[in-house]
Amino acid sequence: MWKWKKDKGNEFPKQNETVKDVTKSLEQSKDFMVYPLDGKTKCVLSYFETMVEPKVLNQLILPALKQNALQSLEEMKDVIPVEGLAITDDANLYRQRMMQGHVIIQMKEYDKKFLTIPAVIAEHRKVSIPEVEFSVVGPKEAFVESLDTNINLVRKRLTLPQLTVKELNIGKMTKTRVAVLYVDGVANKENINTVMQRLNDIEYDQINDSSYITQMIADNSNSPFPQLLDTERPDRVTGSLVEGKVVIIVDGSPHALSCPTTIVEFFSASDDYFLPWHLASGFRLIRLFAVIFSVISTPVYVAILTYHHEMIPQDLLATIVSSRADIPFPPILEVIILELTIELLREAGARLPTKVGQTIGIVGGIVIGTAAVEAGLTSNVLLIIVALGALASFTTPVYQIGNTIRLLRFPFLIGAQMWGLVGVSIVMAFFIAHLIKLKSIGRPFFSPIYPLRFHDLKDAFIRLPFNKQSMRPIQTRPVDSARFNQKRANEKRDVDE
Amino acid sequence: MNDAKGGFNVPENLMVTSTMTFFLVHSMQVGVGMLGFEKYIAEGAGYDAWISILVAGIAVHLLLWMIYRLLQDCGGDLVSIHNFLFGKYLGGLLNLVFSVYFLLLSLTVLRTFVEVIQVWVFPQLNVWLFALVYLLLAYYFVIGGLRVITGMCLLSVMLGLPLLFFKFFPLQIGDVNNLYPMIDASVSEILSSAKTSTLSFLGFELLLLFYPFIKDQKASKKWAHFGVFYTTMIYLVSAIVAFIYYNEDQLQHITWATISLWKIVDFPFLQRFEYMGIGLWAYVVLPNICLGLWAASRIPKRMFKIKQKYVLWLYLVILLVISSLIDNRRTIDALNTFTNQVGFYFLLYIPVLFILMFIMKKVRYRHGI
Amino acid sequence: MEFKKLSPIILAITVFLTGCIPHQSVEEVSLVSLSGCDYVDEELTECTVAIPHYGRSKEEVPTEQYLSYTAKTMKEIDNGLESKSPRPIRMGKLSVALYDEDLAIKDLSDIIDMLARDPHIGRDVQLGIVGGKTKKVIGTKYSENQTTADYLLGLVEQNERNIFPKTNLHRFLYAYYGRGIDGYLPYFLWEEGEVRMEGLALFKGGKFVHLVTNDEVLTFKMMVQNFNQGVQAIELDGEEVAMENIGSKVKYKIEGNKDNPKFVISVKMNGVISEISDLNILETNKRVKKIEAAFSSFFEKKSKNMVAQFQEKNVDPLGLGHLLHHRKGEITQEEWNMRYPDVPVDVQVTVDIIQTGISS
């Protein structure tokens, strides 16, 4: 976990400011408006022009003020037909509310006491179909950048009074709204406390996306593995909540985080729950195999071609040797060149607009690949292996782990070059050690493999039918662990009954 | 039993479940010895040596039972038993002997594994460098505590499973006649082979140290016995497969029978699985070294209240230096024989301890304590 | 502090830079696929190796390079071959190893020991004895689209699926080191650019002592292996009758005790008549019985004859001593050598003709 250096002296904003100080500092901005009203009611309105919805101001606030003769803020509060009004004299709140798009009314300029009227412009993207975690069957809603919409999407699916939403503001400058969701009575208190504690401890100045939170509250921030699962699907979030997980949604980010999570969860897609269990299990196994292949294939190629020639069967030998006949580089260099090329293409593709990206993919894949083989820079056997490996790394349902897998093979390559297959084994052992040690919000990340949890294995490498999943995952240590009564599900009828 | 109480309490979150005893016991027993034990056990009882494995297995079960009685009576670990029986100074000395012994186990396993790599894969291997990296790996595990090591034990058993499947290939072309005549060797021959196979079974005595880390200690007994049973079965199967595949005179020419067996494993996409097997064996060997180091460094921690980390560093350096200094086959063979002998006496020591404990309890009971 | 942070990286780089083992990638080494050793004189041996060179395109048939060197010891030969080759020579992919007759008669023990000791050599290497010089066998191009090694391997594998018993390095070592059992290897003959299998060479230890000719091979295989291939023709009542073996099983039994054993080899063979000039439907049953009896006695006579020859040469490819050792009690090699020539061996062959083909 990120160790925050507590440094109170450098607090921002400064303590002990008065409303006057704040106003003075805000006045430097061009879009800050101070607008004295001289009609029936005498008062001063101040707001950010760019933040306030003109409709609210013009159609609700101003008519109310102009039609009535109001002598105090309390009277205004009764008259103005907007909800969420408040009267305080807290200078900090003054600044904060101003920045959140409230209209603030004072009786006189620089008056201590003020009324805040929420009138923020609600501009955000419409709920659209998920792009990163698209699935052919199943719901097609994805989170958007608005926290309220996102919570609404979750609440719509989980109409449960126990669904609790806690909110806090994080980021010394951005003051981003972060919501923590959990189902009371299912989620473990300890998990909730850990999450809240860690969120409270964050002292960074800006939170621009949920991925900031992922990195800041991770148990081991030096790990290449993501320790919080991020998703853009509300149905996946509901699933996590019901399993007793804690979900973090950040305002301004279309990705929700759920924790504690395990490594196997990163390889399970929401499709797995929409398909019959045997098909889903089959696809999961294929995905798992793809990931192992993606990480191991090129290192094994290097190990065998560099050291263990005997392992190549006679029939394959001709293919491999003739494809490598004129290559001027040793296998390791050949592999690194090709792997880097693929990574380059991927990076370029990700940064470019969709249409150009596709073109680059085709140009890169076909033209560069063929040209490299033709020119004798790489062998076509390796080209196939690398391309398959790249393809396999795309099968991961969660984008983050795909990134991890992209880079994971490079240490393996070093191991393979040093000590052949033994080297691959040793690097693997390092990763195993790392994974065993890794925790997600204090819960073992490598579960259900270690600690071995047979119950959780029912929904890990394979997914057993729903009537076998009578228990919520032990991993999350849910308060209420039973989903349904397994005994009743097990009752079987005799013939002709 | 004040001494026993003078031990320590292991925090709940550092404990392992009783099921894990199976993996701890089993993975410490199966190590590098399994790659070539067939030749050595066949030296005594010939091809009846599979009986010796059963005999050794039964003996180990018996010893395991004694260890459990000892631990249950005393309630602590090896250090508290020693302190209880022999007092602070003699007990302390014995503790240190055990610490060195566990270190010796790690050394033997490490150096023999490096030797296997040197013989089979890389004759020009830079021994100290490989040992360094491997020990760093072990350090990374041990520093995580017993829980992390247990995780590796579990995974090493799982990753070792495909290697058992490879035994199927030599079975197809073996000759069962080799096993006849059954039970032809004399009792003394079988016992001498059983003694030779001790090295293969060494490691379960580590239970004396990790016992306090087990959550449900009563339930773990079953799992520990099951672990020993599984080990015995694996050795039995390996020995029988080797005996069927090679004839007796041929086996005497084969130092690493199990690795040689992998040579004939052949798939359309890969063949000569000994390279793969040795690669996978790195996982089987790792828990041995980790557990050995953990146990060896834990004893001083329990005795002197010094940080286990520092002892660990010291032991790592010792292992690194010694394994780099040993540089020929003969010394490694001698080391193995030596460890085998020492291990055998350490096993004999367990019944002694058991009897002493028994007497001590009687005496104390009589005196009304 | 800075050093502490950097130290893992420095360590990793050092390890990587110093840790690499001298290596050549697969196309930079000469992978020997075929080797042969010839007798030159009492001291010298000439070894030839074939190294395939794979071209860039896959369709191209690899060209083979042949290297020969004559020296006293295998070590010298290794060095000598190395000195002739532009790339390091690796024996790891050796698939066929041939030895000439004279060398085999002299002694192959040293070479066999060397093969057994080398960890890089597989256990499925095909060994073979050549009547004539191996250099010629290796140097000839037999096929347009196969290397010599592949060709020879194909030749052996094809025949071993048929009437030749299975052989490879492991099986030979098994017999070579085992007591009361002697090994056998296929025997090749090279004639005018063609190579063919000409029988089985039987070994006593590392020495070639007896040849089982091609017309005896089927009978030999019948005695050592269960199999379901091979055709045998005999003459019955003045006409050729051929039977195809579709399943034969062999069983060894020892009667008597360790000191006075009597071996009974019983073979049960199921066959199909594949070639006969006329088979009258009315008397089929009777004739089939007759044919069965004829085949049985043919095989029995032949195999007894062969066993007698083996005993005369004191070579035991059937592993009778091995069996005795395991079934009736310990016996040393010397003891067995003394007793083997006089041990009674009986062969009983039962032939069952279960089909007479689709036409009658």
Image (cartoon, rainbow, N blue to C red):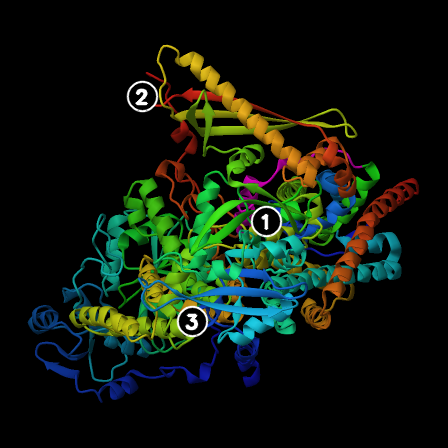
Which is in the foreground here, disc 3 or disc 2?
2
> Is B160 colored magenta in this rendering?
yes
Q: Tell me if mark 1 has few (under 14), some (14-19) or many (20+) residues whose alpha carbon lies within 10 angstroms of its own.
A: some
User: What type is the residue that disc 1 sits on?
Assistant: His
Residue C105 in the image: above or below residue B92: above
Which is in the foreground here, disc 1 or disc 3?
1
User: What type is the residue that disc 2 sits on?
Assistant: Ser
Report in which chain the residue with disc 1 lies: C
| Dots 1, 3 in contact, CB < 8 A | no
Highlighted range, magenta: B157-185
Q: Secondary structure at mark 2?
A: loop
Residue labelled with disc 3: A331
Residue labelled with disc 1: C170
The x, y position of residue B286, in whole percent, is 61, 59
Residue A454 in the image: above or below residue A169: above
* In-image side of B301 versus C247 (left or right): right
Q: Nearer the viewer, residue B300 or B205?
A: B205
Q: Tell me if mark 2 has few (under 14), some (14-19) or many (20+) residues whose alpha carbon lies within 10 angstroms of its own.
A: few
User: What type is the residue that disc 3 sits on?
Assistant: Pro
Q: Tell me if mark 3 has few (under 14), some (14-19) or many (20+) residues whose alpha carbon lies within 10 angstroms of its own.
A: many
Q: Main secondary structure of the magenta part?
A: helix
